[in-house]
Structure formats: C-alpha cells, structure tokens
Image (cartoon, coloured by chain):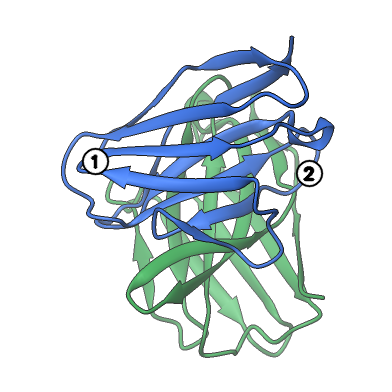
Chain colours: A green, B blue
Amino acid sequence: QVQLQESGPGLVKPSQTLSLTCTVSGGSISNDDYYWTWIRQVPEKGREFIGYIYHTGNTYYNPSLKSRVTISVDTSKNKFSLKVTSVIAADTALYSCARGGSSGNYYYMDLWGKGTAVIVSS
Amino acid sequence: DIQMTQSPSSLSASVGDRVTITCRASEIVKTHLNWYQEKAGEAPKLLVFAASNLQRGVPSRFSGSASATEFTLTISSLQPEDFATYSCQQSYKDPPTFGQGTKVEVK
C-alpha cells in the first residue's frame, strides 16, 4: 500500500534553511488524483497547513509562511520536498507530509506520514 | 483564516461509552469538514470527510454530523483502540485550518 516517509535533519540553527523530503512508496506521485502536502504541529498547538504541490509543479502556500517556504516535487524519485528559509525558534515543530485527495469538490488528507521533529536551536 | 474550535479539549471515558466531540467554525464552511484520529508515534488517520462521510475501512461506530457551523464526531461505543486524539479540519477556504484536538483518555 502507499506510504509516506519524512526525512531530514532534526536540528537546524536559527537563520538557516530547514530542508525536508517526503518519499512516497507503493504508488506514483504523478497520479492525477492526488496532491502532496506539508503540515506542521507546534508543541501544544494545533496543526498548521504549510502548502501543497501537484506533480505538475503547481503549488499553494499558506500566506503566513509564503515568503519563506518552497515546496518542490521530483517525479523521477517519487519524492517531494519542503524548504523553509530563515528559520526561528517558532519553526520548531513536528513536520508531516500527507497525500491530498478529493471526492467531488471535497478535499482532505487521506494518507499521512508519521512526521519528523525539527528543533530550531543554536 | 477560519478558526476551528474543538470542545472539550480532553475527556475521560470508558470502553462502551458513547463519545461526542464538537468542532465549531468561525465562519461558514458548509460541509467541508474532515475528522482525523491521531495516536502518538503513528500517522494520523482520516476518519470522516465532507462532515458525514466515513472513510473506507473506518468502523461504523464512528459518525459525523453538521449543523450550520457546528460539527460533531460521535463514537457510538468506545473501543480500546479508540483512545486517541481527534482533530477537525476545514477545507472550505484556503488555507485549510485545524482544530486544536480533543484527547480521549481512559476513565
């Protein structure tokens, strides 16, 4: 079955760039039925939607993070990636990738990775 | 952004209990409301989409309903594997936003 797995450094220094990858296994990232998302959860707070990408490269970013975030896709490797520049302590969170799907015009995340913890600290 | 407010933030229940969790949206989201189950160390699981549609494979003891801007997730008879955190999420308007979660604990 399809699985998603996040990977990347667990510790990033302030002002540096956070880079994470989500590897999709058991299915193709180029499937037109899905889009690919990044979501984070700051400790003791709700989840925050970061953005999504289609295999075509079309993206959407949360305006709250748009100036610092880039999501890209590598269809040849069945992976998509997240970069957050100029990180600060408030970017410390559990970062998760998820597959977005739809039923008609109803959208949801129907498959998630377990998430990877990232700490921003010097 | 649309604010999603869940209540209660936690509850204690026993196996066999009927459990109800509420999610309120700060503005109209129609029925663009999803529910997820989260367990520590595991990937979140989609339970309900479009307010009342059960995701494939989700037991029928779970159900969702909607009334204006208030949404409810009900577990008709709590099972041992249902102790977890439940979160709502609206997909009506970008960016998608989540509730803060409701933790269902053992009484």
Would you say residue B101 is visible in this rendering?
no
What mark, if any, has residue A72 been given in the picture? none
First along the sequence among labels 1 and 2: 1
**Residue shown at the point (74%, 69%) measured from the top left:** A23
Residue A105 sits in quarter: bottom left
- Where residue A87 appears, x then y in whole percent? 50, 37
Q: What is the distance, in whole Å, between disc 1 and disc 2 at their CAs?
A: 27 Å
What mark, if any, has residue B2 been given in the picture? 1
Mark 1–mark 2 CB contact (< 8 Å): no
**Residue shown at the point (74%, 17%) measured from the top left:** B14
- Where residue A94 appears, x then y in whole percent? 64, 37
Q: Nearest the camera: A36 or B105?
A: B105
**Residue shown at the point (54%, 25%) measured from the top left:** B102
- Where residue A51 appears, x then y in whole percent? 43, 59
Q: Is residue B71 left or right of residue A9?
A: left
**Residue shown at the point (27%, 50%) measured from the top left:** A63
Q: Are marks 1 and 2 on the same chain?
A: yes
Tell me which amino acid carries mark 2: Glu
- Where residue B13 appears, x then y in whole percent? 68, 16
Say above or below: A55 vs B100: below
| Element assignment for label 1 | loop
Provide the chain ID for the residue under circle 2.
B
Q: Residue furthest top?
A: B107
Say above or below: A8 vs B23: below
Q: Nearest the camera: B60 or A52?
A: B60
Say above or below: A79 vs B107: below
Residue A75 sits in quarter: bottom right
Q: Residues within 10 Å of mark 2 (few under 14, many from 20)?
A: few
What mark, if any, has residue B42 been given in the picture? 2
